[in-house]
Amino acid sequence: MSFMNIIPKSFLKDQRGVSAIEYAVLAAIIVGLLVTVVGGDDGLTAVIETTFDNIKEQISSLNTEA
């Protein structure tokens, strides 16, 4: 058996690339979910910003009353 016949067989049996692709797809899905949850007008970021704006308004109203 020549060296050239061994390379294609070992290359076809190697599954490391498939695992890397699976991890990349999972990472892309997770990033997409995080962007959906955190970003946008109804996302977590908007809720946090609204909460901090309400707190800031209440603190400002306390300072003006004093």
Image: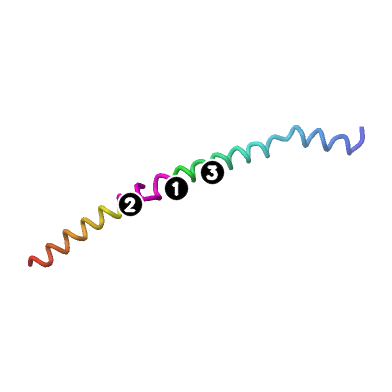
Highlighted magenta segment, given as a residue range: 35-47
| Numbered label attached to residue 28 | 3
Q: Which residue is mark 2?
A: 46
Q: Of label 2 and label 3, which has the lower sequence position? A: 3
Q: Nearer the viewer, residue 53 or 3?
A: 53
Residues packed near mark 1 inside 10 Å, few (<14), some (14 to 19) or many (20 plus): few
Q: Judge left or right: residue 1 versus residue 50.
A: right
Task: Indicate yes or no whether the magenta region holds residue 7.
Answer: no
Instruction: Tell me the element at label 2.
Output: helix
Compare residues 28 and 4 and report the one nearer the observer: 28
Q: Residue at x 17, y 61 (%)?
A: 59
Amino acid at dot 1: Val
Label 1–label 3 contact, CB within 8 A: no
User: In the visual, does 31 lie left or right of 12?
Assistant: left
Label annotation for residue 35: 1
Residue drawn at x 89%, y 38% as measured from the top left = 3
Q: Nearer the viewer, mark 2 or mark 3?
A: 2
Mark 1 and mark 3 lie on one chain; the one further toward the N terminus is 3
Which amino acid, mark 3? Answer: Ala
